[in-house]
Amino acid sequence: MNNRLSRIFASLGPFIGLAFVIGLFSLSNEVRPFFLTGGNFKIILTQTVIVAVGALGMTLIIVSAGIDLSVGSLVALTSVVAARLVLGMAAPELTPADIRDPAALFSRLRSPQDSVSRFVVEKLSDDGRRELATPAAAPSAIVRDLNALVMGPELQAGGRFEGVTLRSGTRVLLAQANRSRDAQARLNRLLLEDAFPGELTTLRPFWVVTTLTCVMTILAGGVVGMVNGVTIARFGMLPFIVTLGMMGVVRGAAKWMGKNQTVNPPASPVNDLMALTDPQHLFPLPLGVWVALALAVVMAVVLRRSVFGRYIFAIGSNEATARLCGIRVQRQKILIYSLAGLFFGLAGLMQFSRLTQGDPSVAIGLELDIIAAVVIGGASLSGGTGSIAGSMIGAFMMAVLRNGSNQMGWPTYMQEIIIGIVIVLAVGLDKWRQIRSARRTG
């Protein structure tokens, strides 16, 4: 009976802790009207996403008796990767490589027969005119002049594009009454493409940019996770040391890729993943929240119901025994760290979406928050114990603690002290459970 009660308490412990924290902040008459609102819980859920997605991967690692300290740096790197990808694929500026047929473009501009060509020639700089008059010249100055039109004011004024066949995407942007600077620049680029369909390459549609950005950013995280896994599994090195070294390597790579500054791409649908709409009400929730919840359900099933999940628990409980039972421990560890890296890459994508920029200095200490969420959720740092549901509750509890502390007006150092105490208590509770379990079995 006592064993059964202990198991029930261990399963419900994170939920009881969450209920206690919410109840604690609800006691204040000043805070309660703002804390217990749908809009505030939408903010908390949005703030939970990055830690929760990272905790999905960290749960696999910790249950297998491993650790990964490079998460924060990897989130920073993948946020920069996402920003660079959007900047490279969605930026409306032309490059010399975007001139599909330079000879045809020069021919149209030397003998302009339509209003758009005549307008472009009128706007050419002196360098552009000299380049146009030079046989077999490379269109470098003309590209700069075209970009001045792309990034300038409304290009469609004055009926210049009458008679030009406009694509549906161009017409959609053209119909918008209030366009942002990025949207106007994109419209200008599309107008030029429609006017010079054989001379200019086509700007990638946003759905292509979004898909490629998401896939390549997540894969970048998976590659770093695979390197960690191979190093740990093949060379028998301690996860703590390997990922500690990788933390510095990845952070340095993020600063190199971002040139030691933030990368600010134009607005794209990737930003909508974490965008808050109707902030006064709980619904609709940002897409990122639903993605995190869906992945949590999938990974809970994988961890508890699949052969791969059983292997993870077996390796974490006793690696030597797992090897003797025929489990290919090295291969499983590589899979575990690679899969975790994919989740860390997704967390970096969410970080980029939330900040709308890639920042190589962001997410410092995030690995501690993610590890804390997993431990608060009932996972043991010794391995062999843990659950996805517990980790999600742990991530949510930490977001509630920070949000409630802000509502109470507590300074940042007080929040850090409270979260530190909670982590120590969670680890102490895990140690106490291990001692009791050892006494029962001994």
Image (cartoon, grey):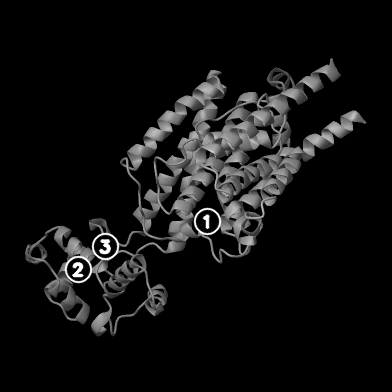
Mark 1 in CB contact with mark 3 (< 8 angstroms): no
Q: Residues within 10 Å of mark 2 (few under 14, many from 20)?
A: some
> Please, what is the three-letter code of the amino acid marked with disc 2?
Leu
The earlier-in-sequence mark between 1 and 3 is 3
Q: Residue at x 16, y 58 (%)?
A: 140
Q: Which is nearer the N-term, disc 2 or disc 3?
A: 3
Give the spatial CA distance, label 1 vs label 3: 36 Å
Against 95, residue 263 (above or below) is above
Q: Which of the image's four quarters has the C terminus?
A: top right
Residue 234: percent from the left, percent from the top? 54, 21
Can residue 121 be seen from the camera position used here? yes
Is disc 1 placed on a helix, strand or loop? helix
Above-or-below relation of 345 to 92: above
Mark 1 vs 2: CB contact within 8 A: no
x 68%, y 31%: residue: 426
Residue under numbered circle 2? 105
Mark 1 = which residue? 274
In this view, which residue lies farthest toward the top?
Answer: 442
Q: Nearer the viewer, mark 1 or mark 3?
A: 1
Number of other residues with Cα within 10 Å of mark 1, as a class: few under 14, some 14 to 19, many 20 or more: many
Tag 3's secondary structure? loop
User: Label 1 amino acid?
Assistant: Met
Q: Taking the image as drawn, is residue 199 in sight? A: no
Classify 10 Å Cα crowding around label 3: few (below 14), some (14-19), many (20 and above).
some
- Nearer-the-camera pick, 408 or 282: 408
Gap in angstroms between the C-alphas marked 2 and 3? 9 Å
**Percent from the top left, x then y, of residue 9?**
81, 36
Q: Residue at x 35, y 49 (%)?
A: 263
Secondary structure of residue under mark 2: helix
Question: Circle 3 is placed at which residue position?
Answer: 100
Disc ID at residue 136: none
Q: Amino acid at mark 3?
A: Arg
